[in-house]
């Protein structure tokens, strides 16, 4: 019996100080950046912040109140700098801003007539935008000119709300249609023809604003409120949580790397409770491309069932930390949602899991705490 999961489980593992070895590999991590809006009752408007992708806690970068809210943000993967777009409705012009993600210092680098609805930077550093309602353009920052590629076609829309590139060079977008009812589509767009190549309707209708493609396979988004949204591959919009400083305007992701788990995590782990009705055991091994894989097994109707394998992801205490210490995962099985954490308790792994049923079965949502040890120990 096979248990199907969402496909990618985000799982964190811990590094014990002094346990690194020369065989350790690197795995990507990321930081979400946004600017605090002037609306929505924000406490610190016009401020660059980092946003924790789990707790949604917002931390100021640089001086509070020093940077205008950005309608859209993107990251230049060739320089590590952030690029933002503001629109002045009175002047009917858009300003492109370059932002240092470490200090929060910023400068205006170009001004364009009309509205630039979003900004996205390709892996080679080429900046793309949407001019007007749906015209895909390539920006020339130096000359403050742009090259028109084509109007985005292939799906019904009033306008293109946002665009962003994933690390593999695919351009993702959000299309907005207001009549006869509000519908937003998550799409991919051919950068040469501006044709929509894939399309899926998003729900619930949260009026998504700016999007940011992250290395964990999800798309994070704002809807210009205090909420942080995560868009799942099936178009479902999940609210991750709410910030502490204000409404978010513009969002981007800056990728980095952390040391990943060493041989203290690789291998077989078993539940200390032989009578568990949850996860009985799991194995951790290196997959392709150079990513840790989690293979779990569960107690299912008197026999052991095999879970789908999933890539693992590491996190640390802060943006500048070089050691990952904690673990977490989220998965949607189709009949329940699970949110779990892993952390070391001596030589054991403590696993806490929250299960929320979505199948209208009437069962109580519950929490479990279990411990795992290395097989044979």
Image: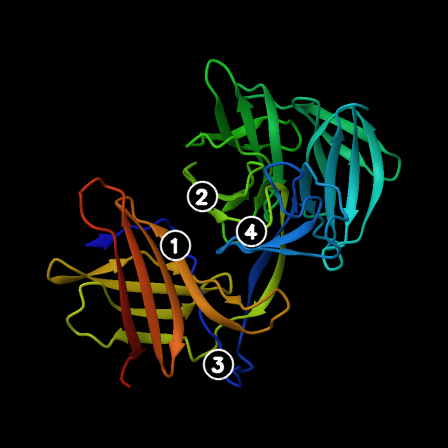
Residue at (59%, 44%) from the top-left corner? Answer: 212
Closer mark to the observer between disc 2 and disc 3: 2
Residue at (28%, 86%) from the top-left corner? Answer: 377
- Front residue (pair 95, 263): 95
Residue topped by disc 2 = 239
- Within the image, what quadrant is residue 10 found in? bottom left
Disc number at residue 133?
Answer: none
- In the rendered structure, the answer to whether residue 346 lies left or right of residue 185 reads left
* Residue 122 in view (yes/no): no
Residue at (55%, 69%) from the top-left corner? Answer: 317
Residue topped by disc 1 = 330
Residue 312 lies, with reference to residue 235, above or below; the image says below
Residue topped by disc 3 = 16
Label 2 crowd (10 A; few <14 / some 14-19 / many >=20):
some
**Pointer 4 and pointer 3: residues touching (CB < 8 Å)?**
no
- In the rendered structure, the answer to whether residue 162 lies left or right of residue 309 reads right
SS state under label 2: strand
Task: Tell me the distance, in whole angstroms, between the alpha carbons under discs 4 and 3.
Answer: 31 Å
């Amino acid at each position: 019996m096979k248990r199907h999961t969402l496909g990618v489980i985000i799982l964190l593992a811990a590094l014990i100080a002094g346990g690194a070895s020369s065989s350790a590999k690197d795995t990507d991590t990321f930081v979400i950046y946004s600017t605090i809006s002037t609306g929505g009752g924000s406490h610190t408007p016009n401020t660059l912040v980092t946003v924790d992708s789990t707790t949604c806690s917002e931390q100021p970068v640089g001086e509070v109140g020093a940077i205008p809210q950005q309608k859209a943000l993107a990251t230049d993967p060739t320089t590590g700098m952030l690029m933002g777009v503001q629109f002045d409705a009175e002047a009917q012009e858009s300003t492109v801003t370059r932002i240092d993600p470490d200090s929060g210092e910023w400068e205006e680098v170009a001004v364009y007539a009309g509205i630039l609805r979003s900004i996205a930077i390709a892996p080679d550093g080429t900046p793309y935008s949407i001019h007007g309602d749906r015209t895909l353009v390539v920006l020339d920052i130096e000359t403050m000119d742009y090259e028109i590629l084509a109007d985005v076609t292939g799906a019904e829309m009033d306008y293109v709300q946002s665009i962003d590139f994933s690390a593999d060079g695919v351009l993702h977008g959000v299309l907005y249609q207001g009549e006869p009812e509000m519908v937003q589509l998550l799409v991919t767009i051919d950068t040469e023809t501006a044709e929509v190549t894939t399309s899926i309707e998003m729900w619930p209708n949260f009026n998504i604003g700016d999007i940011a493609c992250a290395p964990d396979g999800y798309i994070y988004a704002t809807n210009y409120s205090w909420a942080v949204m995560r868009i799942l591959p099936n178009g479902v919009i999940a609210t991750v949580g709410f910030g502490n400083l204000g409404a978010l305007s513009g969002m981007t992701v800056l990728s980095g790397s952390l040391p990943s788990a060493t041989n203290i995590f690789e291998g077989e782990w078993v539940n200390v409770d032989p009578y568990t009705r949850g996860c009985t055991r799991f194995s951790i091994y290196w997959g392709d491309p150079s990513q840790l894989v989690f293979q779990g097994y569960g107690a299912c109707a008197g026999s052991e069932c095999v879970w789908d394998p999933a890539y693992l992801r590491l996190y640390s205490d802060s943006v500048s930390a070089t050691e990952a210490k904690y673990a977490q995962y989220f998965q949607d099985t189709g009949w329940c949602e699970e949110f779990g954490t892993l952390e070391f308790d001596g030589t054991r792994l403590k696993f806490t899991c929250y299960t929320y049923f979505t199948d209208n079965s009437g069962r109580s949502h519950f929490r479990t705490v279990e411990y795992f040890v290395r097989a044979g120990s």
